[in-house]
Image (cartoon, rainbow, N blue to C red):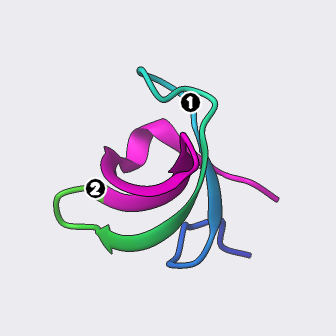
Amino acid sequence: MSKGIIIGDKVIVEEGPMCGLEALIKKIDRHHRIAEIESEIFGRKARMRVGLEIIRKIK
């Protein structure tokens, strides 16, 4: 069974200033190894781009 990340998966950021942040995958660029994630910060939805290496899928 594959353990890859796909659009719509819930993930957690494991490194950097957003460490511990839970978010949803909105877009994936596998060529550049970047994911666009969306999370609620200060009561507003925010989108950000992060490396695939620093996120982990939540079961």
**Quarter of the image that includes the N terminus:** bottom right
Q: Which mark is residue 1?
A: none
Question: Residue 15 magenta-drawn?
Answer: no
| Residue 21: quadrant of the picture | top right
**Could you tell me what secondary structure mostly forms the magenta stretch?**
strand
Question: Residue 51 magenta-drawn?
Answer: yes
Mark 2 or 1, nearer chain start: 1
Q: Residue at x 43, y 73 (%)?
A: 26
In the rendered image of this protein, does residue 11 appear above or below residue 19?
A: below
Relative depth, front residue between 2 and 50: 50
Magenta segment boundaries in residue numbering: 35-59
Q: Amino acid at mark 1?
A: Glu
How far apart in space, not on screen, are marks 2 and 1 (Cα)?
Answer: 14 Å
Residue that numbered label 1 is attached to: 14
Q: Residue at x 34, y 61 (%)?
A: 36
Q: Secondary structure at mark 1?
A: loop
Image coordinates for residue 33, horizontal then vertical, percent: 27, 55
Q: Which mark is residue 34?
A: 2
Relative depth, front residue between 52 and 50: 50
Q: Amino acid at mark 2?
A: Ile
